[in-house]
Image (cartoon, grey):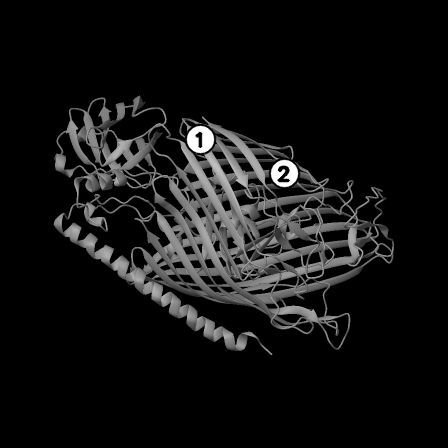
């Protein structure tokens, strides 16, 4: 019996119909806006100016013709004009080889085209419908920023205008547009130039806030999100800071299709994508697999991250051996050319406190050598008995420009964690055990320590304007000097008595990764191509030593009336396991622009995955297993853009993940790799002149070759199982009004076992709620006596979830409310974040075991923070 055989086509047809209806509404709206814009440009053909594609600036002059409901009174007209006024929040001057570059930072990145004139030796640009709102005042002035330029002034003028005056020493300077701002050079020859020939464009360099426009995870190229034929969501730095979250699962609560099941034993992020566990190999940092997660001990701190990118669905075409649900990429902060120094201190419940530093700037006058240093110290208590943790992390980065076409970035990262493993609570009957949230069934002496060191570089070189080269090399070292604490063995559900056995583990691991990409842009006739050719290699070695003997019991504990033995035991090595993994990948991808409306993404990858496992008891010495898997994984996607604000897409993708080398069929043959296949359709749309974006996606995802018990050979497994996930996801992010930001999601998910020899077909997958939704929104007052005051509100709903594949117990649904209060002034900000405002008792997730591993969500928690920037 295959549960998906009937319902899949019906639900797919329903998804197509739903998407088609929404497509029609969005397309008509977008077409109306496009026609209206064409009418405006017909009246004023010089009102728009083409700028580079990577600029986020809209250069057409603002017009009330773009407002849906025209003003009918003077009051309404004034209100509309004030609402569309652009706020310039920062002015920077950067040195170039020929002069300077003036960068005007805006709240929304959109500046109208200025008018220009020459007055003596000064070039004057006036920007209409704009206002200068700098932290240090309402004007900017800098004398002699470069040789030949005497003065740069930026001031407010009557009538909502901003005036930029650039005075040359001997002659008015020349200004031209660049991708990052206004480039100014000396202009001795300009005196005889016709003033009408001078063209000037002032661009806004903006923090994209809640609505990033591009990502690299989906294609390994910097591609606009609307051009990617697959669901990809970004949690930007501003959201992380507004919510004051510190681990990946907390940040990803804002993304549809993602379940944060908490920290497995307090040291591993347990995250599910589209119903499937991300496993250890699905976490990446700057596009390179994280060794710590791969080995099962990862909990990335967010202090050094610029954003978190989530690519949903199979991703083996670029990332090799990964689990089916998707990949998570942590993008770190890059060095900046302007000096900036920030310090943040926070404190909260349970004697928790944390400090962060972020230092960046140039190391030479030419600004060709930049640095960044991020550091964090976190000492956190917990609502769980005996559970506390201490973490230190430091991440230095150095970037060097050897010329206009060659750059090198060197990254380091060191972190250390000491904590008590938290085994969660068990299940009794069809629900989690009814015990206090603070109840721990771990011994007070239990301990987990790890150290991680990462070193590497990224080399970029442009051969010319069309072809470039990127080489990434990483070394990762991972050490677990101590992991000790008794583990659960069996539970008497009638009495609550939990049997345990002594356990310890020590780990030494090293990983070496190399990745090389060639990226080229060219045309074949009228068709444009962006070609990616690449290869990657990874070698990982790990040595594990265990104290593991289930025949020797540790004193039991009663979960309802615990008496802790607190008896530390010796940890002689009774079992060992040494692994070596070699992976080789070769891939090609072509992003094809067939026309302004049609784009095609096609790619393929061939992987070779070798592994060698040596394991066994100390006596007899060892058993050796070797295994080689190879796989070709294709990818295909198409994007249709009926307007500048709407993208319709469809895609097909595959994944594969080899089994452990020691897993064998009854006849001794190797397991086939677990594979995944996904079909996805969706709509991506921009609203409010690009400030707000939405993605609606429908998908069918199948995971094949799942290990299941062999009915003919008890104690053995065979890879005949199948699991299917299908659903609809909605994500919205951006700015509704100046100062009002939002990130929200909603998910419908039907994730089930569709083929298995022991688990009933039709059972829901672990931690896969049928419905879930999230909303986080903030508002900051923009002017007046209360300027700088802000508020935040979060609502998070998760439906009922099954706690194991047997569906023997259920985690109940919950609604959690978060809140925040901010006050920002000049260069400092104070914030108060409240999580679980109404102190709801809820469960994050389960590890799939009845004897433990059910994780409570935190109760009412208050975190106060103060940050200052220089």
- Check the image and report above or below for 779 versus 145: below
Label 2: element kind: strand
Residue carrying label 1: 823
- Check the image and report above or below for 520 versus 778: below
Residue 522 or 621: which is nearer the viewer? 621
Image quadrant occupied by the C terminus? top left
Residue carrying label 2: 415
Instruction: Answer whether residue 246 is visible to the viewer in this image.
Output: yes
Residue 48 or 833: which is nearer the viewer? 833
Which of labels 1 and 2 is toward the front?
A: 1
Image quadrant occupied by the N terminus? bottom right
x then y, percent, for residue 78: 21, 38
Gap in Å between the C-alphas at discs 1 and 2? 32 Å
Q: Residues within 10 Å of mark 1 (few under 14, many from 20)?
A: some
| Direction from residue 434 to residue 24 in the image, left or right | left
Q: Quadrant of residue 355?
A: top right
Residue 301 or 436: which is nearer the viewer? 436
Instruction: Answer whether residue 322 is visible to the viewer in this image.
Output: no
| Direction from residue 410 to residue 207 in the image, left or right | left
x then y, percent, for residue 113: 22, 40
Q: Earlier in the sequence, mark 1 or mark 2?
A: 2
- Residue contact between numbered discs 1 and 2, judged by CB atoms under 8 Å: no
């Amino acid at each position: 019996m295959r549960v998906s055989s009937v319902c899949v086509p019906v639900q797919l047809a329903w998804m197509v119909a739903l998407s088609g209806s929404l497509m029609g509404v969005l397309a008509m709206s977008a077409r109306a806006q496009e026609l209206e814009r064409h009418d405006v440009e017909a009246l004023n053909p010089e009102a728009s100016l083409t700028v580079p594609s990577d600029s986020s600036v809209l250069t057409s002059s603002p017009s009330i013709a773009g407002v849906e409901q025209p003003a009918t009174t003077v009051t309404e007209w004034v209100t509309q004009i004030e609402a569309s006024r652009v706020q310039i929040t920062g002015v920077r001057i950067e040195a170039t080889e020929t002069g300077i570059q003036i960068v005007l930072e805006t709240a929304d990145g959109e500046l109208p085209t200025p008018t220009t004139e020459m007055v003596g030796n000064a070039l004057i640009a006036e920007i209409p419908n704009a206002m200068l709102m700098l932290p240090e005042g309402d004007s900017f002035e800098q004398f002699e920023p470069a040789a030949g330029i005497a003065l740069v002034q930026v001031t407010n003028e009557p009538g909502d205008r901003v005036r930029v005056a650039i005075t040359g020493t001997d002659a008015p300077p020349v200004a031209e547009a660049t991708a990052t701002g206004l480039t100014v050079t000396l202009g001795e020859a300009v005196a005889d130039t016709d003033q009408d020939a001078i063209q000037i464009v002032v661009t806004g360099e903006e923090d994209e806030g809640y609505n990033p426009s591009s990502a690299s995870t989906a294609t390994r190229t910097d591609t606009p999100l609307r051009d990617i034929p697959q669901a990809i969501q970004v949690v930007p730095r501003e959201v992380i800071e507004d919510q004051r979250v510190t681990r990946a699962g907390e940040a990803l609560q804002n993304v549809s299709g993602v379940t944060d099941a908490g920290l497995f034993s307090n040291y591993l992020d347990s995250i599910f994508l589209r119903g499937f566990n991300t496993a250890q190999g699905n976490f990446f940092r700057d596009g390179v697999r994280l060794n710590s997660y791969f080995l099962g001990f990862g909990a990335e701190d967010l202090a050094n991250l610029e954003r978190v990118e989530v690519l949903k669905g199979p991703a083996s075409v670029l990332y090799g051996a990964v689990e089916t649900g998707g990949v998570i990429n942590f993008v770190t902060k890059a060095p900046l050319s302007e000096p900036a120094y920030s310090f943040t201190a926070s404190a909260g419940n349970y004697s928790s406190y944390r400090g962060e530093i972020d230092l960046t700037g140039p190391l030479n006058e030419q600004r060709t050598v930049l640095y960044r240093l991020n550091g964090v110290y976190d000492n956190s208590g917990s609502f769980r008995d005996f559970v506390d943790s201490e973490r230190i992390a430091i991440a230095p980065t150095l970037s060097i420009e050897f010329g206009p076409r060659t750059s090198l970035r060197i990254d380091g990262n060191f972190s250390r964690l000491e904590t008590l493993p938290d085994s969660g609570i068990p299940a009794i009957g069809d629900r989690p055990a009814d015990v206090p949230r603070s109840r721990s069934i771990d011994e007070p002496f239990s301990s987990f320590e790890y150290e991680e060191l990462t070193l590497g570089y990224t080399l970029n070189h442009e051969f010319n304007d069309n072809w470039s080269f990127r080489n990434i090399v990483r070394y990762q070292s991972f050490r677990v000097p101590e992991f000790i604490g008794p583990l659960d063995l069996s539970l008497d559900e009638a009495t609550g008595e939990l049997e345990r056995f002594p356990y310890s583990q020590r780990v030494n691991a090293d990983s070496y990764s190399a990745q090389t990409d060639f990226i080229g842009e060219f045309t074949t006739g009228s068709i444009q191509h962006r070609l990616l050719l690449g290869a990657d290699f990874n070698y990982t070695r790990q040595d594990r030593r265990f104290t593991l003997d289930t025949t020797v019991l540790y004193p039991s504990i009663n979960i309802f009336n615990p008496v802790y033995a607190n008896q530390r035991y010796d940890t002689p090595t009774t079992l060992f396991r040494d692994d070596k993994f070699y992976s080789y990948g070769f891939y090609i991808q072509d992003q094809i622009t067939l026309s302004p409306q049609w784009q095609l993404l096609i790619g393929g990858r061939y992987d070779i995955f070798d592994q060698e496992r040596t394991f066994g008891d100390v006596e007899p010495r060892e058993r050796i297993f070797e295994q080689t898997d190879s796989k070709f994984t294709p990818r295909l996607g198409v994007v249709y853009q009926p307007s500048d604000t709407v993208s319709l897409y469809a895609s097909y993708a595959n994944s594969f993940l080899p089994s452990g080398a020691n897993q064998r069929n009854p006849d001794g043959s190797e397991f086939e790799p677990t594979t995944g296949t996904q079909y996805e359709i969706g709509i991506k749309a921009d609203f409010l002149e690009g400030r707000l974006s939405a993605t609606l996606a429908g998908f069918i995802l199948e995971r094949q070759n799942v290990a299941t018990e062999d009915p003919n050979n008890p104690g053995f497994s065979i890879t005949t199982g199948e699991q299917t996930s299908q659903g609809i996801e909605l994500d919205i992010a951006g700015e509704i009004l100046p100062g009002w930001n939002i990130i929200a999601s909603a998910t419908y998910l039907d994730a089930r076992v569709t083929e298995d020899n022991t688990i009933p077909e039709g059972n829901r997958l672990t931690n896969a709620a049928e419905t879930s939704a999230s909303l986080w929104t903030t508002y900051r007052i923009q002017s007046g006596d209360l300027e700088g005051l802000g508020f935040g509100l979060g609502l998070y709903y998760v439906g009922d979830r099954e706690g194991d594949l047997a569906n023997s117990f259920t985690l109940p649904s919950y609604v959690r409310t978060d809140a925040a209060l901010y006050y920002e002034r000049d260069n400092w900000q104070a914030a108060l974040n409240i999580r679980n405002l109404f102190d709801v008792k809820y469960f994050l997730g389960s590890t799939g075991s009845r004897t433990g591993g059910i994780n409570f969500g935190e109760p009412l928690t208050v975190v106060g923070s103060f940050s200052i920037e220089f």
